[in-house]
Image (spheres, rainbow, N blue to C red):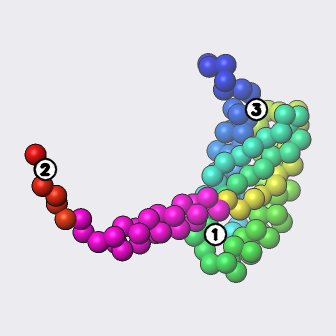
Amino acid sequence: MPKDYSRTLRIADQIQRELADLIRNELKDPRIGMITLTGVEVSHDYAHAKVFYTTLRSENDKFLTSNGLEHAAGFLRSHLSHRLKLRVIPQLHFIYDESIERGMQLSHLIDEAVAQEGPKKETDRP
């Protein structure tokens, strides 16, 4: 095991896997549709975990998803305590991850810039 892969990172990865399974199979809240967990950051004392997620829903539905996840945080935490063998189960804080949307916007801007430039004419090459 490499030294740079600390216990905190391993716990964050395990929390992400278990939460994804719990949300997919156990959570029945209609406000929470298809979401993707993009990452988990756990504090050094394991008291708090930031859970980053993304969804392809509209802006209004993102608000509902956020409320649904915050409402389900206690349920998810209690189920995590049964799946993980930790003394302290972190408080879950759900944060919407906008990096996917920003990446799509940048890609769209690049495509527009390339389209405006037009086709390049071949120059004489030796």
First in sequence, mark 3 or 2: give its number. Answer: 3
| Badge 3 element | helix
* Residue lying at 61% horizontally and 66% vertically, measured from the top left: 55
Mark pair 2, 1: CA separation: 55 Å
Cα separation between marks 3 and 1: 29 Å
- Residue 38 in the magenta stretch? The answer is no
The residue type indicated by label 1 comes to Gly
Packing grade of label 1 (10 A; few <14, some 14-19, many >=20) is: some
Residue type marked 3: Thr
Q: Indicate the quadrant where residue 65 lies.
A: bottom right
Determine the image quadrant of residue 72: bottom right
Q: Residue at label 3?
A: 8
Helix, strand or loop at label 1? It is loop
Q: What residue type is labelled 2?
A: Arg
- Extreme-bottom residue of the structure: 60
Which of the labelled discs sits on residue 81, or is there none? none
Residue 89 appearing in the image: no
| Residue 18 screen position, x and y as percent | 68, 45
**Residue 116 location (% of width, % of height):** 36, 74
Whichever of labels 3 and 1 marks the residue nearer the N terminus, that label is: 3
Residue occupied by mark 1: 33
For mark 2, what is the residue? 125
Image x and y of residue 70, in percent: 82, 63
**Residue 39 makes an appearance in the image:** yes
Marks 2 & 1, CB-CB < 8 Å contact: no
Question: Is residue 106 shown in magenta?
Answer: yes
Residue 110 at x, y percent in the picture: 44, 65
| Residue plotted at (80% across, 46% down) | 49
Look at the numbered disc 2 and give the secondary structure of its residue.
loop
Residue bounds of the magenta highlight: 98-120
